[in-house]
Image (cartoon, helix red, strand yellow):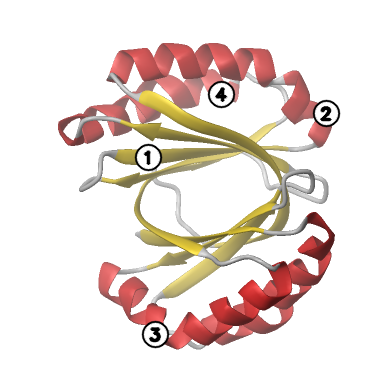
């Protein structure tokens, strides 16, 4: 499975309109495309950062969507008041424990590492990090996406509520420090978001 993330550093007051646009216009256009398997959108109402992630069955179908969705991204830029940045990923790990409902929140951690360490990072995430996350109250799901060519990865962990997200911060920090050390990675960014749209249909890959 493969993914594409489109990030807007939006004006915070545009987020509700942007969510409606992605839900009502962009997502229906995507449903007609070969290989599309879902979409999620997360947003930070304080910073304005919004990330829309689409999932695809093959790399070729993901890449072919670029030309078709260019106009939609440009319309998104008009609504959000910000130019988009685009990242492409391989979906390496997906684990679901509980469905995420209204009020769910997501913590994303971006990492950089030597390209030779990607396989070890995936194995460590699957074998060591997921069992630890399962012990945290409010944990719903987790995923790991990687860019093997650039030595980058992003982990997304969903919690049932804002309260559960906040309560998990200390445990998450400890896991982040230990895991990044184990795999020789540098944590380049951490963000906390509302789960604005949750329509990804990616099979369990744990």
Left or right of 152, for residue 13: right
Label 2: which residue? 163
For the point 35% across and 54% down, the residue is 89
Q: CA distance from mark 2 to mark 4?
A: 16 Å
Q: Position of residue 6 (x, y in %)?
A: 51, 62
Viewport quadrant of the N terminus:
bottom left
Give yes or no for contact between labels 2 and 4 (Cβ–Cβ under 8 Å).
Answer: no
Which label's residue is closer to the chain start, 3 or 2? Answer: 3
Indicate which label's residue lies in the foreground, 4 or 1: 1
Give whichever of 25, 133 is nearer the camera: 25
| 122 lies above or below 173 | below
Q: Which mark is residue 133?
A: 4
Q: CA distance from mark 1 to mark 2?
A: 26 Å
Graded by Cα atoms within 10 Å as few (under 14), some (14 to 19) or many (20 or more), the crowding at tag 1 reads many
Q: Position of residue 56 (x, y in %)?
A: 40, 68
Q: CA distance from mark 1 to mark 3?
A: 25 Å
Label 2 residue SS: helix
Quadrant of the rendered structure where residue 26 is? bottom right
| 107 lies above or below 26 | above
Label 3: which residue? 67
Q: CA distance from mark 4 to mark 1?
A: 18 Å
Residue 31 appears anywhere in the view: no
Which label's residue is closer to the chain start, 2 or 4? Answer: 4
Give whichever of 72, 9 is nearer the camera: 9
Q: Which mark is residue 153?
A: 1
For the point 45% across and 31% down, the residue is 188
Indicate which label's residue lies in the foreground, 2 or 4: 2
Q: Position of residue 198 (x, y in %)?
A: 66, 59
Which label's residue is closer to the chain start, 3 or 4? Answer: 3
Give yes or no for contact between labels 1 and 3 (Cβ–Cβ under 8 Å).
Answer: no
Label 4 residue SS: helix
């Amino acid at each position: 499975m493969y993914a594409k993330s489109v990030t807007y550093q939006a004006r915070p007051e545009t987020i509700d309109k942007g969510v409606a646009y992605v839900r009502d216009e962009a997502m229906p256009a995507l449903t007609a495309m070969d290989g599309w398997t879902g979409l999620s959108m997360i947003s930070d109402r304080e910073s304005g950062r919004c990330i829309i992630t689409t999932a695809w069955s093959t790399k070729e179908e993901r890449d072919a969507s670029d030309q078709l969705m260019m106009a939609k991204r440009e319309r998104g830029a008009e609504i959000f008041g910000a130019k988009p940045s685009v990242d492409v990923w391989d979906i390496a790990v997906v684990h679901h424990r509980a469905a995420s409902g209204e009020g769910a929140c997501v913590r994303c951690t971006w990492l950089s590492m030597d390209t030779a360490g990607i396989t070890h990072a995936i194995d460590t995430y699957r074998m060591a990090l997921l069992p630890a996350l399962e012990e945290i109250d409010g944990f719903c799901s987790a995923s790991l996406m990687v860019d093997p060519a650039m030595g980058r990865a992003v982990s997304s962990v969903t919690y049932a509520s804002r309260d559960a997200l906040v309560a998990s911060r200390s445990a998450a920090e400890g896991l982040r420090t230990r895991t990044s050390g184990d795999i020789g990675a540098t944590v380049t960014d951490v963000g906390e978001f509302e789960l604005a749209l949750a329509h990804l249909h990616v099979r369990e890959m744990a």
